[in-house]
Amino acid sequence: MGGIGAPEKLIVKGKRLDGRAFDELRPIQIKAGVVKNADGSAIIVQGETKIIAAVYGPREVFPKHFQEADRAHLNCVYDMAAFSTPERARPGPSRRSVEISKVIRDALAPAVFLEKYPKTAIDVYIEVTNANAGTRVAAICAASVALADAGIEMRDLVTAVASGKADGQLLLDLFELEDNYGEADMPLAIMPQTGEITLLQMDGEVSQDEAAKLIEMSMQACQKIYELQKKALREKYLAEGAATGEASE
Protein backbone atom coordinates (compact mmCIF):
# COMPACT_ATOMS: atom_id res chain seq x y z
CA MET A 1 0.00 0.00 0.00
CA GLY A 2 1.31 3.40 -0.93
CA GLY A 3 3.20 5.00 1.91
CA ILE A 4 2.80 2.06 4.31
CA GLY A 5 5.91 0.15 5.34
CA ALA A 6 6.22 -3.56 5.96
CA PRO A 7 4.16 -4.78 8.94
CA GLU A 8 6.01 -6.51 11.79
CA LYS A 9 3.89 -9.66 11.33
CA LEU A 10 1.51 -10.85 8.64
CA ILE A 11 0.07 -13.61 10.84
CA VAL A 12 -1.16 -12.60 14.31
CA LYS A 13 -2.63 -15.13 16.77
CA GLY A 14 -3.21 -17.66 14.00
CA LYS A 15 -5.09 -15.18 11.82
CA ARG A 16 -4.21 -13.07 8.81
CA LEU A 17 -4.27 -9.30 9.15
CA ASP A 18 -7.65 -9.12 7.39
CA GLY A 19 -9.12 -11.75 9.72
CA ARG A 20 -9.32 -14.62 7.24
CA ALA A 21 -8.32 -18.23 7.79
CA PHE A 22 -5.26 -19.41 5.88
CA ASP A 23 -7.38 -21.24 3.25
CA GLU A 24 -10.17 -18.64 2.98
CA LEU A 25 -10.97 -16.62 -0.14
CA ARG A 26 -11.69 -12.92 0.03
CA PRO A 27 -15.38 -12.09 -0.57
CA ILE A 28 -16.07 -12.36 -4.32
CA GLN A 29 -18.85 -10.87 -6.42
CA ILE A 30 -19.18 -11.46 -10.17
CA LYS A 31 -21.75 -9.92 -12.51
CA ALA A 32 -22.13 -10.46 -16.26
CA GLY A 33 -23.39 -8.02 -18.87
CA VAL A 34 -22.20 -4.76 -17.33
CA VAL A 35 -20.89 -2.99 -20.47
CA LYS A 36 -23.89 -2.42 -22.72
CA ASN A 37 -22.06 -1.71 -26.00
CA ALA A 38 -19.78 -4.77 -25.69
CA ASP A 39 -20.62 -8.20 -27.10
CA GLY A 40 -19.95 -9.63 -23.65
CA SER A 41 -18.72 -8.26 -20.35
CA ALA A 42 -18.28 -8.93 -16.65
CA ILE A 43 -17.15 -7.29 -13.44
CA ILE A 44 -15.42 -9.00 -10.54
CA VAL A 45 -14.93 -7.59 -7.06
CA GLN A 46 -12.53 -9.71 -4.99
CA GLY A 47 -11.81 -8.12 -1.66
CA GLU A 48 -10.72 -4.61 -2.62
CA THR A 49 -9.64 -5.62 -6.13
CA LYS A 50 -12.15 -4.54 -8.80
CA ILE A 51 -11.88 -5.38 -12.51
CA ILE A 52 -14.10 -4.96 -15.57
CA ALA A 53 -13.68 -7.10 -18.71
CA ALA A 54 -15.32 -6.43 -22.08
CA VAL A 55 -15.28 -8.65 -25.19
CA TYR A 56 -15.76 -7.49 -28.77
CA GLY A 57 -16.05 -10.01 -31.58
CA PRO A 58 -15.62 -12.17 -33.44
CA ARG A 59 -14.99 -9.26 -35.81
CA GLU A 60 -12.79 -8.22 -38.71
CA VAL A 61 -9.09 -8.41 -37.96
CA PHE A 62 -7.16 -5.15 -37.93
CA PRO A 63 -4.35 -4.84 -38.84
CA LYS A 64 -4.76 -7.51 -41.51
CA HIS A 65 -1.40 -9.22 -40.90
CA PHE A 66 -2.83 -10.57 -37.60
CA GLN A 67 -5.44 -12.54 -39.55
CA GLU A 68 -5.12 -16.32 -39.16
CA ALA A 69 -6.61 -18.54 -41.86
CA ASP A 70 -7.61 -21.41 -39.57
CA ARG A 71 -8.53 -19.69 -36.31
CA ALA A 72 -9.47 -16.48 -34.56
CA HIS A 73 -6.82 -14.14 -33.27
CA LEU A 74 -7.43 -13.80 -29.51
CA ASN A 75 -6.20 -10.43 -28.30
CA CYS A 76 -6.12 -9.48 -24.60
CA VAL A 77 -5.34 -6.00 -23.31
CA TYR A 78 -4.82 -5.57 -19.56
CA ASP A 79 -4.68 -2.04 -18.25
CA MET A 80 -4.64 -0.40 -14.83
CA ALA A 81 -6.62 2.82 -14.43
CA ALA A 82 -4.52 5.75 -13.23
CA PHE A 83 -6.56 5.84 -10.01
CA SER A 84 -6.41 2.08 -9.35
CA THR A 85 -3.46 2.29 -6.93
CA PRO A 86 -2.56 4.78 -4.17
CA GLU A 87 0.41 5.88 -6.28
CA ARG A 88 -1.05 7.14 -9.56
CA ALA A 89 -0.37 4.70 -12.39
CA ARG A 90 1.16 6.12 -15.57
CA PRO A 91 -1.29 6.06 -18.51
CA GLY A 92 -0.61 3.77 -21.44
CA PRO A 93 0.90 0.28 -21.67
CA SER A 94 3.83 -0.64 -19.44
CA ARG A 95 6.15 -3.64 -19.64
CA ARG A 96 4.17 -5.20 -16.79
CA SER A 97 0.78 -4.68 -18.46
CA VAL A 98 2.07 -6.11 -21.76
CA GLU A 99 3.42 -9.17 -19.93
CA ILE A 100 0.18 -9.70 -18.00
CA SER A 101 -1.87 -9.27 -21.19
CA LYS A 102 0.08 -12.15 -22.75
CA VAL A 103 -0.27 -14.28 -19.60
CA ILE A 104 -4.04 -13.78 -19.60
CA ARG A 105 -4.30 -14.54 -23.31
CA ASP A 106 -2.31 -17.76 -22.91
CA ALA A 107 -4.47 -18.80 -19.92
CA LEU A 108 -7.75 -18.25 -21.79
CA ALA A 109 -6.81 -19.58 -25.25
CA PRO A 110 -6.98 -23.33 -24.44
CA ALA A 111 -10.64 -22.92 -23.40
CA VAL A 112 -11.80 -21.08 -26.54
CA PHE A 113 -12.76 -22.85 -29.78
CA LEU A 114 -10.67 -20.42 -31.82
CA GLU A 115 -10.86 -22.71 -34.86
CA LYS A 116 -14.60 -21.99 -35.14
CA TYR A 117 -13.92 -18.33 -35.96
CA PRO A 118 -11.22 -18.27 -38.71
CA LYS A 119 -9.96 -14.95 -40.07
CA THR A 120 -11.54 -12.98 -37.22
CA ALA A 121 -10.40 -11.27 -34.04
CA ILE A 122 -11.77 -11.69 -30.53
CA ASP A 123 -10.70 -8.70 -28.46
CA VAL A 124 -10.73 -8.81 -24.67
CA TYR A 125 -10.22 -5.51 -22.87
CA ILE A 126 -9.54 -5.62 -19.13
CA GLU A 127 -9.53 -2.54 -16.91
CA VAL A 128 -8.36 -2.69 -13.29
CA THR A 129 -10.24 0.07 -11.47
CA ASN A 130 -8.91 -0.83 -8.02
CA ALA A 131 -5.86 -2.99 -7.35
CA ASN A 132 -5.26 -4.90 -4.13
CA ALA A 133 -3.28 -7.96 -5.28
CA GLY A 134 -4.40 -10.87 -7.44
CA THR A 135 -5.30 -8.70 -10.42
CA ARG A 136 -4.13 -11.12 -13.12
CA VAL A 137 -6.12 -14.05 -11.73
CA ALA A 138 -9.23 -11.97 -11.06
CA ALA A 139 -8.91 -10.60 -14.61
CA ILE A 140 -8.86 -14.14 -16.01
CA CYS A 141 -12.04 -14.98 -14.10
CA ALA A 142 -13.82 -11.84 -15.34
CA ALA A 143 -12.58 -12.23 -18.92
CA SER A 144 -13.75 -15.84 -19.03
CA VAL A 145 -17.27 -14.83 -17.97
CA ALA A 146 -17.21 -11.99 -20.52
CA LEU A 147 -16.26 -14.42 -23.31
CA ALA A 148 -19.14 -16.73 -22.38
CA ASP A 149 -21.47 -13.71 -22.16
CA ALA A 150 -20.42 -12.78 -25.72
CA GLY A 151 -21.56 -16.21 -26.94
CA ILE A 152 -18.02 -17.35 -27.79
CA GLU A 153 -17.95 -21.16 -27.88
CA MET A 154 -15.74 -22.50 -25.08
CA ARG A 155 -14.64 -25.88 -23.78
CA ASP A 156 -15.09 -24.56 -20.26
CA LEU A 157 -14.76 -21.38 -18.27
CA VAL A 158 -11.28 -20.58 -16.99
CA THR A 159 -11.04 -20.00 -13.25
CA ALA A 160 -8.01 -18.59 -11.46
CA VAL A 161 -6.71 -17.70 -8.02
CA ALA A 162 -3.35 -16.93 -6.40
CA SER A 163 -1.95 -18.61 -3.33
CA GLY A 164 1.37 -18.08 -1.62
CA LYS A 165 3.41 -17.99 1.55
CA ALA A 166 3.83 -15.34 4.25
CA ASP A 167 5.33 -15.60 7.75
CA GLY A 168 6.02 -19.26 6.97
CA GLN A 169 2.32 -20.04 6.39
CA LEU A 170 0.74 -21.21 3.15
CA LEU A 171 -2.08 -18.80 2.27
CA LEU A 172 -4.91 -18.67 -0.25
CA ASP A 173 -5.85 -15.53 -2.19
CA LEU A 174 -3.20 -13.07 -1.02
CA PHE A 175 -4.17 -9.49 -0.36
CA GLU A 176 -1.79 -6.57 -0.91
CA LEU A 177 0.37 -6.69 2.23
CA GLU A 178 0.82 -10.47 1.91
CA ASP A 179 1.63 -10.11 -1.77
CA ASN A 180 4.13 -7.28 -1.19
CA TYR A 181 5.90 -8.64 1.90
CA GLY A 182 5.34 -12.40 1.81
CA GLU A 183 7.81 -15.03 0.69
CA ALA A 184 6.02 -16.39 -2.39
CA ASP A 185 3.09 -15.86 -4.76
CA MET A 186 1.69 -18.58 -7.07
CA PRO A 187 -1.04 -17.62 -9.60
CA LEU A 188 -2.89 -20.62 -11.04
CA ALA A 189 -5.68 -20.97 -13.63
CA ILE A 190 -7.61 -24.10 -14.56
CA MET A 191 -10.50 -25.38 -16.63
CA PRO A 192 -12.48 -26.79 -13.69
CA GLN A 193 -14.33 -29.62 -15.48
CA THR A 194 -11.10 -31.37 -16.42
CA GLY A 195 -8.68 -29.80 -13.94
CA GLU A 196 -6.38 -28.83 -16.83
CA ILE A 197 -3.97 -26.12 -15.71
CA THR A 198 -3.70 -23.22 -18.17
CA LEU A 199 -1.53 -20.94 -16.01
CA LEU A 200 1.00 -21.65 -13.29
CA GLN A 201 3.56 -19.06 -12.22
CA MET A 202 5.79 -18.63 -9.18
CA ASP A 203 7.32 -15.52 -7.68
CA GLY A 204 9.45 -16.38 -4.66
CA GLU A 205 10.58 -19.66 -3.16
CA VAL A 206 8.73 -22.63 -1.68
CA SER A 207 9.63 -26.29 -1.27
CA GLN A 208 8.33 -28.96 -3.63
CA ASP A 209 5.89 -30.19 -0.95
CA GLU A 210 4.69 -26.64 -0.30
CA ALA A 211 4.17 -26.05 -4.02
CA ALA A 212 2.03 -29.19 -4.23
CA LYS A 213 -0.05 -28.04 -1.25
CA LEU A 214 -0.52 -24.58 -2.77
CA ILE A 215 -1.68 -26.09 -6.05
CA GLU A 216 -4.17 -28.33 -4.25
CA MET A 217 -5.45 -25.39 -2.17
CA SER A 218 -5.86 -23.23 -5.27
CA MET A 219 -7.61 -25.92 -7.30
CA GLN A 220 -10.15 -26.45 -4.53
CA ALA A 221 -10.74 -22.69 -4.34
CA CYS A 222 -11.16 -22.51 -8.12
CA GLN A 223 -14.14 -24.86 -7.87
CA LYS A 224 -15.82 -22.34 -5.54
CA ILE A 225 -15.07 -19.43 -7.87
CA TYR A 226 -16.33 -21.52 -10.81
CA GLU A 227 -19.75 -21.74 -9.17
CA LEU A 228 -19.81 -17.93 -8.83
CA GLN A 229 -18.90 -17.53 -12.51
CA LYS A 230 -21.71 -19.86 -13.60
CA LYS A 231 -24.13 -18.13 -11.22
CA ALA A 232 -23.30 -14.74 -12.76
CA LEU A 233 -24.09 -16.04 -16.25
CA ARG A 234 -27.31 -17.74 -15.13
CA GLU A 235 -28.53 -14.59 -13.39
CA LYS A 236 -27.81 -12.46 -16.46
CA TYR A 237 -29.76 -14.70 -18.81
CA LEU A 238 -32.62 -15.26 -16.36
CA ALA A 239 -32.94 -11.47 -16.07
CA GLU A 240 -32.90 -11.13 -19.87
CA GLY A 241 -35.52 -13.86 -20.19
CA ALA A 242 -37.76 -12.16 -17.64
CA ALA A 243 -37.38 -8.82 -19.44
CA THR A 244 -38.22 -10.42 -22.80
CA GLY A 245 -41.29 -12.05 -21.28
CA GLU A 246 -42.50 -8.77 -19.84
CA ALA A 247 -41.96 -7.00 -23.18
CA SER A 248 -44.02 -9.58 -25.06
CA GLU A 249 -47.01 -9.31 -22.74
Image (tube, grey):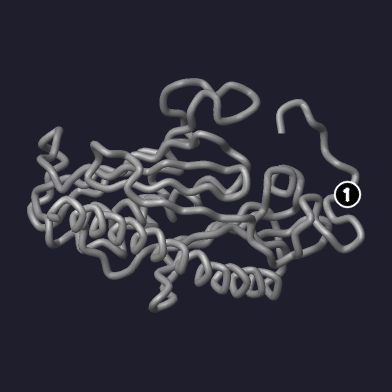
**In the picture, which quadrant includes the C terminus?**
bottom left
Residue 229 against residue 59 in the figure, above or below: below
Question: Residue drawn at (62%, 41%), measured in percent from left and top?
Answer: 132
Q: Amino acid at mark 1?
A: Lys
Q: Quadrant of residue 164?
A: bottom right
- In the rendering, at what x and y percent does residue 140 appear? 43, 53
Task: Decide if residue 142 is on the left or right side of residue 210.
Answer: left
- Please tell me which residue lies in front, 180 or 11: 11
Q: Residue furthest front?
A: 249
Crowd tier of the residue under label 1, counting other residues whose Cα lies within 10 Å: few below 14, some 14–19, many 20 or above: few
Question: Residue drawn at (73%, 59%), measured in percent from left and top?
Answer: 165
Q: Secondary structure at mark 1?
A: loop
Residue 53 against residue 166 in the figure, above or below: above
**In the picture, which quadrant includes the N terminus?**
top right
Q: Which residue is mark 1?
A: 9
- Please tell me which residue lies in front, 82 or 110: 82
Q: Quadrant of residue 5?
A: top right
Task: Decide if residue 132 is on the left or right side of residue 234.
Answer: right
Task: Decide if residue 19 is on the left or right side of residue 160.
Answer: right
- In the rendering, at what x and y percent does residue 194 appear? 39, 78
- In the rendering, at what x and y percent does residue 178 appear? 73, 49
- Please tell me which residue lies in front, 210 or 125: 125
Question: Residue drawn at (12%, 50%), measured in percent from left and top?
Answer: 68
- In the rendering, at what x and y percent does residue 150 appear? 23, 52
Residue 113 against residue 58 in the figure, above or below: below
